[in-house]
Amino acid sequence: MQIVHLTTSGELGGAETSLLALMAGVRRAEPHWSVSVIAPGAGALVDELKARGIPVRVLPFPLALARLGESGDETRRFGRRATALAASVPYASWLARALKQEHPSIVHAHGFKMHILSALVRPAGSAVIWHVHGYIGQRPLTCGALRRLSTRVAAVVANSRSVAADVERVLGTRAPIRTIYNAVDLTDFVPGGSRIDLDALGGLPPAPPGTVRVGLVATLGRWKGHATFLDAIQRVPGDVPLRAYIIGGAIYETDGSQVSLEELRRQAEARGIGSRVGFTGFVRNVADAMRALDIVVHASTEPEPFGMVIAEAMACGRAVIASRAGGAAELINETVDALAHDPGDADQLAGAIVRLAADPVLRARLAAAARAHAEQAFDCERLAESLVPLYRTLATA
Ligand code: GLC
């Protein structure tokens, strides 16, 4: 069996982190299968693949294609799309050539750009899987393209039931849809282990003993809820011994899709909480950062397709507060293994933070239940048990 994964980023966002865990699971189950990756740029994912001895080839997206997205300034979009489309034509033939050399039985494509390209250039004798990590329905152009190309696809994997329902609304029954939850490396994301010095990294003086640390761990996507988090921190009374951290950096090239750390710093200053919030930037070892927190916040203002951060924080045995919408709501049992708030509701989020800051026993109870839940739901072996038979069926079809 030869499996080639196509990714839309060489950096490490949620989709790429989940790909690493997926490959680890499949490799453990089927050590003799060959697995390789084609990525459109260098970055932390590519470095990590090399470190793990997984063959990876960087086939750089032309800039216009890398920057193309369905967010950002409406008026400038048309020209950009035309340029991106023109740039995609030679890229598609490079990709076709690269794939042909690998003779894959399975082309496993992650991210909308690679979904489209994989269907266009599918080599003879291979089955294409679209692994859907986000909501298609929100993107009119992508929707149209995927609908047209979906008959060339052998199967669609959705990362949550919520995403599967969205795929079904868009694609109907054109391709079989399977929900497979992402996995987390449960040996790396463990409650005990090394911790990053978040204060030093965030340029803050050491916090006094007894300080409760709460962090939003996210890429700088505009919908990840940084403003909601800062609003919530502003609402936490000054006498609560709390320090907040924004952990993550800009990793995507898509136009207009991210906030900058400078903008967030300004927002914190404007709210009068500059000295209470540390900004770490991109952190390579997320588990070490999570273990340095008492409370991990997920605050996406739009439905989160899955939410790797939630699964990872649960595996690290942290008290989690999640935004209850989309796939994220499927990952937790509210009040048993996590608390939750409505997307964008800073009052509710502040309430949950204050409650957890004051109650170490509650934090410990949620944390223990979260780890148990993660072991059962986000195990790499469990993922392989669903994916390996799917690969087998499609490869022999
Ligand atoms: C995307 C989604 C995120 C999910 C990840 C892995 O980044 O936005 O919710 O956790 O893919 O599937």
Image: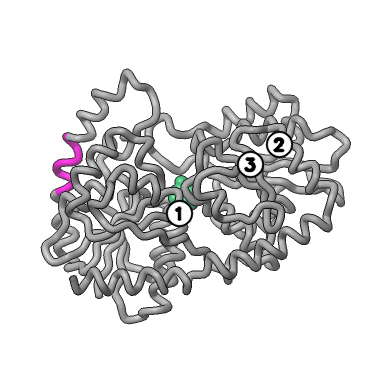
The number of callouts visible is: 3
Q: Residue furthest left?
A: 124
Q: Which residues are magenta?
A: 86-92
Question: Looking at the image, what colour scheme do you see?
Answer: one colour
Q: Position of residue 145 (x, y in %)?
A: 22, 40
Residue drawn where x is 18% and y is 52% of the image: 151
Question: Which quarter of the figure has residue 46?
Answer: bottom left
Tag 2, which secondary structure? Answer: helix
**Residue type (three-letter) at the residue carrying disc 3:** Ile
The numbered mark, 2 or 3, whose residue comes first in the sequence reads: 3
Residues under labels 3 and 1: Cα distance?
26 Å
**Residue type (three-letter) at the residue carrying disc 2:** Gln
Residue 87 lies in magenta, yes or no?
A: yes
Residue 83 lies in magenta, yes or no?
A: no
Residues under labels 2 and 3: Cα distance?
19 Å
Say which residue label 2 marks.
Answer: 348
Q: Residues within 10 Å of mark 2 (few under 14, many from 20)?
A: some
- Left or right of residue 309: residue 45: left
Q: Position of residue 12 (x, y in %)?
A: 46, 52
Say which residue label 3 marks.
Answer: 246
Q: Mark 1 near ligand 1 (CB under 8 Å)? A: yes
Say which residue label 1 marks.
Answer: 160
Q: Mark 3 near ligand 1 (CB under 8 Å)? A: no
221 to 175, vertically: above or below: above
